[in-house]
Image (cartoon, rainbow, N blue to C red):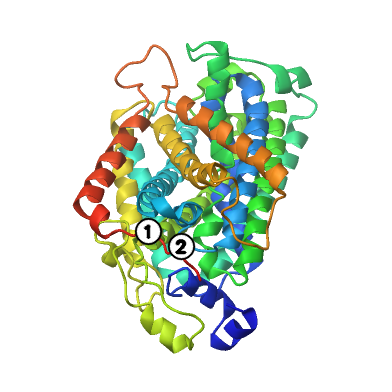
Amino acid sequence: MEKSKAAHDGPEDDVQLAEMGHKPELQRNFSTLSMLGLAFAVLNSWTALSASLSLSLPSGGSTSVIWGLVTAGFCNLCIAVSLAEFLSAYPTAGGQYHWVAVSWPKWVPILSWVTGWINVAGWVALVATNALLSCELIAGIVSSVYPDFVWQRWQEFLIYVGYTLLAFVINAFMNSILPIIYRGAFTWSIGGFVLICITVLACASPDYNSAYFVFCDFVNQTGWPDGVAWLLGLLQGGLGVTAFDAVAHMIEEIPNPSIKGPKIMVVCVGIGTFTGAVFLIVLLFVAGNMDEVVNSSAGPLLEILIHATNNRVGGICLLMLPLVCLLFATLSVMTTSSRMIFAFARHVIPPFSLPAPRSTWTRRLTQNRDGGLPASKFFARVHPRLGLPLNALMLTAFVVIIFGCIYLGSSSAFNAIVSASVVALDLSYAMPIAVNCLRGRRTLPDRKWKVPNAIGWVIDTISLSYIALTTVLFLFPPDRPVTGSSMNYCIVAFAIIVIVSVVQWVVDGRKNFTGPRVDLS
């Protein structure tokens, strides 16, 4: 369809969305800055990396913290560049589950079904991850002030539930000001990053750890061989720079998405890697004795801040900055998760001819087929007054709380939930990239964001190799010997997801699910 023609039939962005088989139901009220703020709040790199130091310090020490992030950052930047091509060609909130379909139309239903379920699971697990990180920091503050207090898992679980419900309430009833909140989140995050770096460096001077310690010290307290232990430490770096597909799942709420979306996706990974690396280097220089940091009941981050400032109150005050960042992160991840559920449950229209008057194609968009989730019509419903997919938001909050029940029964629940989010999201990234490579990288139409083919092959190969390696490693238990309570229950979570999705496919999907529309002629 000619662009000049489309301009007369309605906003070009909405016409493009209609061509992909979806009714424009969400308002495009996000600016480039507010969308970048949301994307950066989702990655939340420097905060997530510092709050999850307990993942990598026993699994490689400083070398894993710094060089693990560099490795994960570079590989995730390659993944972001690869997916940016898809986003430019098909700017739809369905993201990966739509892109994998247009890459191989012959296998549309099953490819979209698998990718959609994996992506939904990854985003729900990421909401749980951010709520759990917040819970860990709050518990650390209490343990620092009251050293004799012994936390019970159910107590931390209640904080986790409260944090989740707070994020739900803000998402549900303050939707109109979310763009403002996310612009503020970006400013708060960058400002907090700068403030903490300057403060701890000034207070700790000249009592710094050596450069050799920061960049070369190796520690292995896991029981695994040294090489495996270091690779397990990549989980921290992977967590800090993943979830950049948030831009894709919010893309229907930003104007000119084919141009702005890919740029925001790549830039947020670059900013996250840079700020994360700088912040971790600063923390390691001022950390002091690492045995005290690793074994502190207050948690590694708070212990480092207290040591650097030589003041318990000062350390806790500084911790408020990343704690608020985690609240922004939980908000933004829950927003994105609900939009992903909405997109996957949203019904696909049968083919129709364009151009046509907007009123005509809007009516035709109501002729729906079944979506990818149980009760898809219910979860794809947009609340008429709130202007958001409230049912999808409620499902997100409910499953996140259920997901947190792992915390009640496993001492390695933190690793399991983080692993589940990173592995599921990475697998959803791999699906369209792998299918595109199998098809000779010739499946995407002309687009605004395009990588030269030779460079594209290199980037895609790096992306798929990294995902293949980490998918296996992140399912390992964090420590040996393995017991029932220290097992990585990420694999159990995946098994439940697979069982539910298979049952749903047999009962309904194989008969009614057609996947996203791939014929855009």
Q: Residue at x 32, y 16 (%)?
A: 483
Q: Residue at x 48, y 25 (%)?
A: 473
Residue 16, position in %: x, y? Answer: 54, 73
Count the labels in the image: 2
Q: Position of residue 334 (x, y in %)?
A: 43, 55
Q: Which residue is painted at 63% across and 39% down in the image?
A: 314
Q: Which residue is mark 1?
A: 515
Residue 101 located left or right of residue 44: left
Q: Nearer the viewer, residue 507 or 120?
A: 507
Residue type at mark 2?
Answer: Val
Q: Hey, which residue is sitting farthest right in the picture?
A: 206
Packing grade of label 1 (10 A; few <14, some 14-19, many >=20) is: many
Q: At label 1, which amino acid type do we have?
A: Gly
- What is the quadrant of residue 307 in the picture? top right
Q: Which of the numbered marks, if any, corresponds to residue 240? A: none
Q: Quadrant of residue 410?
A: top left
| Mark identifier at residue 518 | 2
The one nearer the camera, 129 or 366, is 366
Q: How would you rate the neighbour count of disc 2 (Cα within 10 Å): few for under 14, some for 14-19, many for 20 or more?
A: some
Give the side of residue 68 with respect to residue 169, left or right: right
Is 79 drawn above or below residue 245 in the view shown?
above
Residue 139: % across, % down: 44, 36
Which residue is situated farthest in the left direction here?
507
Residue 420, can we see it? yes
SS under mark 1: loop
Q: Secondary structure at mark 2?
A: loop
